Amino acid sequence: MGQIKRLEIDEATSVIIREIIKE
């Protein structure tokens, strides 16, 4: 269960980082 939550957070973080790099 902890791993699944961590994966979701990791994916969300990746999206946020991509948005930051885009600008």
Image (cartoon, rainbow, N blue to C red):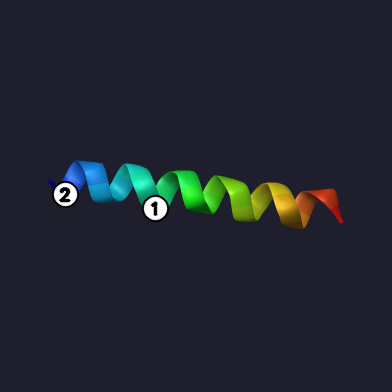
Kind of element beneath mark 1 = helix
Check the image and name the residue furthest to the right. 23
Estimate the spatial distance between the alpha carbons at disc 1 and disc 2, rounded to whole Å: 11 Å
Residue 5 spot, x, y in % from top left = 26, 50
Residue 1 spot, x, y in % from top left = 12, 46
The residue beneath circle 1 is 9
- Of the two numbered discs 1 and 2 on the same chain, state the one appearing first in sequence: 2
Residue 7 spot, x, y in % from top left = 34, 42
Check the image and name the residue furthest to the left. 1
| Residue 1 placement, left or right of 6 | left
| Residue 11 placement, left or right of 15 | left
Where's the C terminus, which quadrant? bottom right
| Residue 23 placement, left or right of 10 | right
Residue 4 image-quadrant placement = top left
Badge 1 amino acid: Ile
Residue 9 spot, x, y in % from top left = 39, 53
The residue beneath circle 2 is 2
* Mark 2 neighbour density, 10 Å: few (under 14) some (14–19) many (20 or more): few
Q: Which residue occupies 52% across, 53% down?
A: 13
Badge 2 amino acid: Gly
Q: Which residue occupies 78% across, 50% down?
A: 21
Kind of element beneath mark 2 = helix
Q: Which residue occupies 30% across, 48% down?
A: 6
Q: Which residue occupies 60% across, 48% down?
A: 15
Q: Give the number of callouts.
A: 2
| Residue 14 placement, left or right of 1 | right
